[in-house]
Image (cartoon, grey):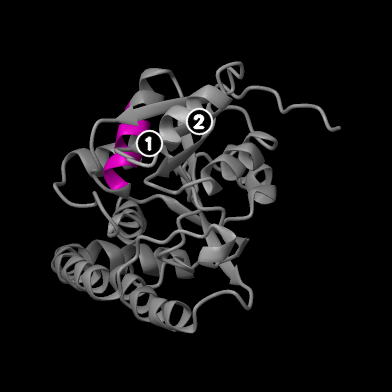
Amino acid sequence: MSAAPPASSSHLVLIPSYNTGPKLFATVAEARARWNPVWVVIDGSTDGTGAELQRRTADDPGVRVLLLPENQGKGAAILAGLQAAAASGFTHALTMDSDGQHEAAVIPGFMAASQREPRAMILGIPIFDASAPRLRVEGRRVSNWWANLETLWLGINDSLCGFRVYPIADLRAVMEKSRWMRRFDFDVEAAVRLTWRGLDLVNKRVAIRYFRPEEGGVSHFRYGRDNLLLAGMHARLMLGFLLRLPALLLRRARSSRH
């Protein structure tokens, strides 16, 4: 058995969860085997997973479970975790989904990249296998195109992958002055606005697996509702893009010289 990872005082894994079922326990165990600490924000779940996770990890100081009283959305759960993490002195958070889709084995590599470049976002490049729904894979190309337009192709390889390392102070600053970024729109808007803020971008590969319902897979994605949410978000971002266009053009010109 490999030794447990030593505790980090700067970087933590942050997992938002809403009614994920038993997949949550495997996800947390896999993340915890590769990093310390792992924090989980239970976003008003009604399936009992919050209490059960607390019971299972009661003797592990490397896992902390935060319980929100009601469901507020992925972005809101992450913000609650960021605020608590900052209060405890952490500077960076790796976010990952709670449903087992993301490859936990690459956590140390993402954290090492962040430690080398603390002023960067470390963005996951999803590597899909045959389990990925074709509509989801093809549909994300649209959002990726818009996100790259809104940032003048400064380096966002994938705008929707939730496996990322963020500098906590920068992400909090962006989120706390906005009423948006609280639900499914979080991942794209965070990538775009932090690029506008001047953060460097590092892209790294992460394997993605979609589990079928009979395998315990749970998805809260709704094609109509969430695609409308993304469309409204990109409309907002285009307005912000136009206001920032001169600064983005200057940054793009400078980056092309290096």
Do residues under tags 1 and 2 come within 8 Å of each other at their CB atoms? yes
User: Number of labelled discs?
Assistant: 2
Whole-percent x and y of residue 185?
27, 59
Q: Earlier in the sequence, mark 1 or mark 2?
A: 1
Magenta stretch, overall SS: helix
Quadrant location of residue 62? top right
Badge number at residue 257: none
Q: Is residue 118 visible?
A: yes
Circle 1 crowding by C-alpha within 10 Å: few under 14, some 14–19, many from 20: many
Q: Is residue 222 left or right of residue 25?
A: left
Residue occupying the point 38% across, 68% down: 252
Callout 2 secondary element? helix
Comparing marks 1 and 2, which lies closer to the viewer?
2
Q: CA distance from mark 1 to mark 2?
A: 10 Å
Task: Name the foreground residue: 194 vs 72.
Answer: 72
Residue occupying the point 43% across, 39% down: 167
Quadrant location of residue 71? top left
Q: Is residue 197 left or right of residue 27?
A: left
Task: Name the foreground residue: 132 vs 107.
Answer: 132
Which residues are drawn in magenta?
Answer: 75-83
